[in-house]
Structures are given as structure tokens and as C-alpha cells.
Image (tube, rainbow, N blue to C red):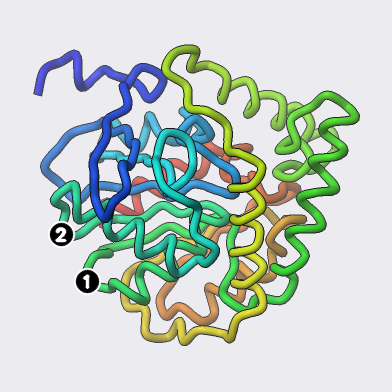
Amino acid sequence: MSSGQRTETYLQVPAKIVKAGGVTYSYRELGPRGGVPVVFLIHLAGTMDNWDPRIINPIAAKHHVITFSNRGVGASTGTVPDSIQSMADDAATFIRALGHGQVDLFGFSLGGMIAQALVLKHPGLVRKMVLAGTGPAGGDGIRNIIGTTYKDVLRGTLTRQDPKEFLFFNRNAAGRPAARAFINRLKERTTDRETPIKLSAFQTQLKAIRRWGLSPSADLGVITQPTLIANGDNDRMVPSVLSSDLHRRITGSELVIYPDSGHGAIFQFHDRFVPVVLDFFAH
């Protein structure tokens, strides 16, 4: 690997494509090759441009990092699935199309739901996983995500702010500046950005999340992969208590809860969270 590749950052890395199962997936990768890759699974309405470079870059300094846009989102073709299970199958198809027999997963919010479905349906594909700001199938309060999301999208429109400032962060002295800093970091990439998700695709993702919330509880006790669970103590989107529920049900899992923070706690506390993730993946 050239030194130029080693110093490449997420803001510079170009998009690539891989075709599998009738879908052309758009993805980005950086970091040293050869080890077990870390595949990032993005949140509701997110494209590859929604990953915080303060999370991606330090992890990619030590690991092969892969981000991609789900089917029907960003530059990936096809139609957005209306179930989390189908999204998990897509992720497995994408991973195998790249030639990887085993990966680590980093799932945030919707991505954490996809990670759970993926490890249950394709257990041999997953070595370790990080579940941040997420909850289990049938989790109490997940069905309310739709109402909360539409309310904060409206608030963002009326105040000309990004809805994530309301959805991901507390509206207090600690949360407001953290929200602005996070949104500004997402704008740092100025070239080759992906098209924002279409309204119909966004609505289909919300439908899938609602189905996840209404579906029967899964047996998470069968998960043997090391799992790191993280959230803030005041998550309005996916209730923080669901992170504790995941921790209780996934044997041997680790739980990190950050104080005075919400759904986007891992971004607010990226400087504290990244070392925990790196230690988790290293052992």
C-alpha cells in the first residue's frame, strides 16, 4: 500500500461500485487492507455522507473500513426494502460480493437493527459488532420513531436547521454546540457527494422500522459474537432503555452510556467513544 493511501481521509476517498443480486451498490473504503473489515451500517435516511469523519478516520487508521448506501439510497440502485430482514440480506449480499467471508459490523440506529438481523440470519459472516443508538425487534417505543421523526423534520424546516440537530442531540447547553459541530463535520466533504434520500424511500424505511417495532421479540441469546452497545442516556428516537435491554439479552455484551446526551451520543463524545471501539475490535 502506498503512503498516499494510508493518509487518505474519508472526505477524499472516492466511491466505488459493486454489482450483486441485480443491484449496483455504491461504497467507499479506506484504511489498511488484509484484516477483518469493519462494515458501517447507516441510520434512517442516511447516505455515505452521513458518517462522522471523526468516527471513520481514526478507526480507518487501524482497520479496513467500508461504508455503503443501502439499496435504493444514494447512488445504490434498486428499491428500498420494506423490512429490516431484507436490508440485512442486502448487506450480506454486498459483503459477499466484495469477497469478504467475515466482517465486523458497526451499526447505528436503523443500521444497528440491520446488524442484529444480519447476525441472526448470517451468523458466520460476523466476527464482532457495535450497536449504537438502536433497539431490538419488538422493542417498546420503536413504533413511535415515525411520529418523533416527522415532528423534528417539521421543527427543522420551520427553524431552517438540520432535523438531526433535534433528533440526535439534547437541546441544552451541551447538546446544541455538539449538534452544530456534528452537522458542520458532515459538510466537510465538498466533492462527489451522494444525492439525499428520496421522500418515498425515506417513508419506506420508516415503514420497515415500524414493522421492526411491532414484530415479535427475537432470541438474542443465540448471539455469540462479542458485542459493544452504546447510547446516550436521553435518546428520544430509540429509547435509551432499549440499549440496556440489548445488553441484558446479548450474553457477554459491553454497554457504554454517555451522560447528558441523546441519540447521537457517539458523535457528541467521539473523542471518548473511538478509543473504546478500537480497544473492542483489537481484543
Q: Which residue is pictured at 27% across the width and 64% down the height?
A: 126
For the C terminus, the quadrant is bottom left
Give the vertical position of 226 relative to 248 (above or below).
Answer: above
Contact, CB < 8 Å: mark 2 with mark 1?
yes
- Tag count in the figure? 2
In this image, 223 relative to 162: left or right? left
x and y percent of residue 31 in the render?
24, 32
Sequence-first tag of 2 and 1: 2
Q: Can residue 276 be seen in this view?
A: no
Q: Residues within 10 Å of mark 2 (few under 14, many from 20)?
A: some
Q: In the rendered structure, which amino acid carries the disc numbered 2? A: Gly
Q: Which residue is pictured at 63% across the width and 20% down the height?
A: 184
Give the vertical position of 108 relative to 169 (above or below).
Answer: below
For the N terminus, the quadrant is top left
Q: Name the residue under label 1.
A: 124
x and y percent of residue 110 in the render?
55, 56
Q: Residues within 10 Å of mark 1 (few under 14, many from 20)?
A: few
- The residues tagged by marks 2 and 1 sit, at their Cα atoms, a distance apart of 8 Å
**Regarding mark 2 in the picture, which secondary structure is present there?**
loop
Q: Can residue 24 be seen in this view?
A: yes
Q: Which residue is pictured at 15% across the width and 59% down the height?
A: 101
Q: Which of 10 and 97 lies nearest the eye of the viewer?
A: 97
**On residue 162, which mark appears?**
none
Q: In the rendered structure, which amino acid carries the disc numbered 1? A: Gly
In this image, 96 relative to 231: left or right? left
Q: Mark 2 points at which residue?
A: 101
**Regarding mark 1 in the picture, which secondary structure is present there?**
helix
x and y percent of residue 22 in the render?
28, 51
Give the vertical position of 240 relative to 120 (above or below).
Answer: above
